[in-house]
Amino acid sequence: MSRVTPAAPVDPALADRRRLTLIATIVGSSMTFIDGTVVNIALPTIGRDLHAALSAQQWIMLSYSLAVASLYIAAGALGDRFGRRPLFEIGVAGFAVASMLCGVAPNTSLLIAGRVLQGVFGALLATNSLALLRATFGADSGRAVGQWTAWTGISTLIGPPLGGLLVEYASWRWIFFINLPAAAATIVFAIRGRIEEQATESPRPINVPASALVTVMFASLTFALIEGPRTGWAAVAWAFGLSFVALMLFVVNERRSSKPLLPLALLHERAFVVANVCTFVVYATLGASMFYLALYLQSEAVGYTPVLASLVFIPVSVIMFFLAARFGRLADRDGPRVYLTLGPIVMAAGMALFTLITSTALTQIVPGVIVFALGLSITVAPITSAALKAAPAQYSGLAAGVNTTVSRMGGLVFTPLLGVVIGIVFASHGGGTGGDPFATAGLGLVGQAAATSAFRVAMMVAAGICACGGLIAWFFLPDRRME
């Protein structure tokens, strides 16, 4: 008769340190989530205060994403080499300093510079946040990611209305200053929850040329897509060419390097590649749709105040809080394929419902928000967990960096592309060439109608592409449970 081995007792001290680490990653990551949501809400007010046109507002938003996307992979590799927790703590402290600089910026140029600096440290923070969860929780990382996703939903619940109140009744500068106490608390939790990390065997050196080429590629492409509609495409042709040359040089460097930025071990994992393709598509449409929804709601065509616009995002946070962790656990049990098919399609349906919005009537926006939030809840935890679990354990930091880079890159590329679509439709419907379709005043009746038409076309384009992300998961993602 076989003897049953009793389960090993749980070490209370280890459980407490794990819990403190989870809290640290939640609070730290929440700073970046709050910042992104609140900056989006504040853009019309910042635009009026600093005399920033739509292209400048895009730079204020996307300069952060550009820095993050350029450095995420390098940040993950640094975490693998020097430890995820120290790099996470450095990222938190640096993000706080950069936030303070944004809060005191006297003009658009310095604000954009501060946002770039936020992105630099945000890359260290966010990448090593997820990798730290993987290293701390091991086989239970899927559940931890689900809890991380759910509780960061609290930040998105509190952040928008708090930001809207600050913007409307105090100053947009306070949306950056609120990061300072959160950063202090994060560092305290991270230090108290410190667990000795197992050193990565033969940590990979940082491929500096490849990292620099990634930065040049993203920066030049973003510049071309944002400035092209304003200055003319011929004037930015050099930027497209530079981006292409950087891409080719990156490929050559990767093929010849003994320590490429993206090891073949990662690229040979089908589930990892497909999960990141889905991430690119879904987050491209997520970032762009939320960016333009916030601008459209506060435009003269609709008429929301900053506070009312911020309240629109509360149902998204509430639904994610209650459902995201559940879908993370289901994906751990059943495999991610079904959830990564259904989620983007439901998100696409919500984007399509956004086209009903023409006024501040709640009946026009609530259906779309609820459907969109449900789809997002189905998607976020499974898509992140799938990408991390498909990677070999020694590359967990790098895998997190790749996945977050891809998510940022999606929004970075698609937001200005969708802006091109908006500009074309706005002009063709009588709004004028080079005008701001989301201006808070001065559009007139014709301009307001043109802005509504432009927004509707943009949402339908985003919905179609988002649904394609679900189809990619269905046809190409392995139908099995991932360990």
Image (cartoon, helix red, strand yellow):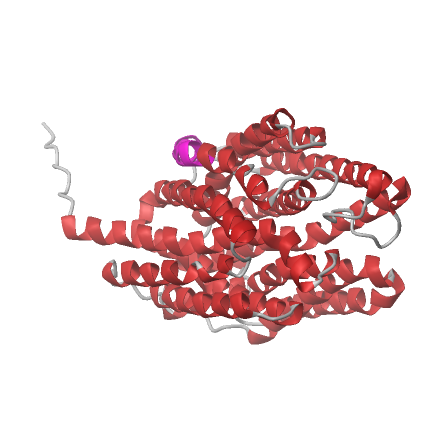
Q: Position of residue 307 (x, y in %)?
A: 55, 43
Query: Is 257 rendered above or below residue 268?
Result: below
Q: Position of residue 341 (x, y in %)?
A: 57, 32
Query: Is 369 rendered above or below residue 177?
Result: above
| Of residues 438 and 479, the one drawn nearer to the viewer in this rendering | 438
Q: Quadrant of residue 49?
A: bottom right
Which residue shows up at 85% across the image and 47% down it?
424
Which residue shows up at 30% across the image and 54% down it?
21
Query: Is 108 rendered above or below residue 317?
Result: below
Specify whether residue 213 is painted magenta: no
Which residue shows up at 78% across the image and 67% down it?
239
Image-based side of 204 in relation to 453, left or right: left
Q: Is residue 268 visible?
A: no
Specify the principal SS of the magenta part.
Answer: helix
Q: Position of residue 24 (x, y in %)?
A: 33, 55
User: Can you say which quadrant of the picture contains the C terminus?
Assistant: top left
Task: Tell me which segment is drawn in magenta.
Answer: 320-334
Q: Position of residue 115 (x, y in %)?
A: 57, 65
| Of residues 377 and 354, the one drawn nearer to the viewer in this rendering | 354
| Of residues 26 and 423, the one drawn nearer to the viewer in this rendering | 423
Residue projecting furthest to the front: 169
Specify whether residue 325 is painted magenta: yes
Image-based side of 85 in relation to 123, left or right: left
User: Can you say which quadrant of the picture contains the N terminus?
Assistant: top left
Q: Quadrant of residue 471?
A: top right
Image-based side of 82 in relation to 386, left or right: left
Which residue shows up at 82% across the image and 48% down it?
423
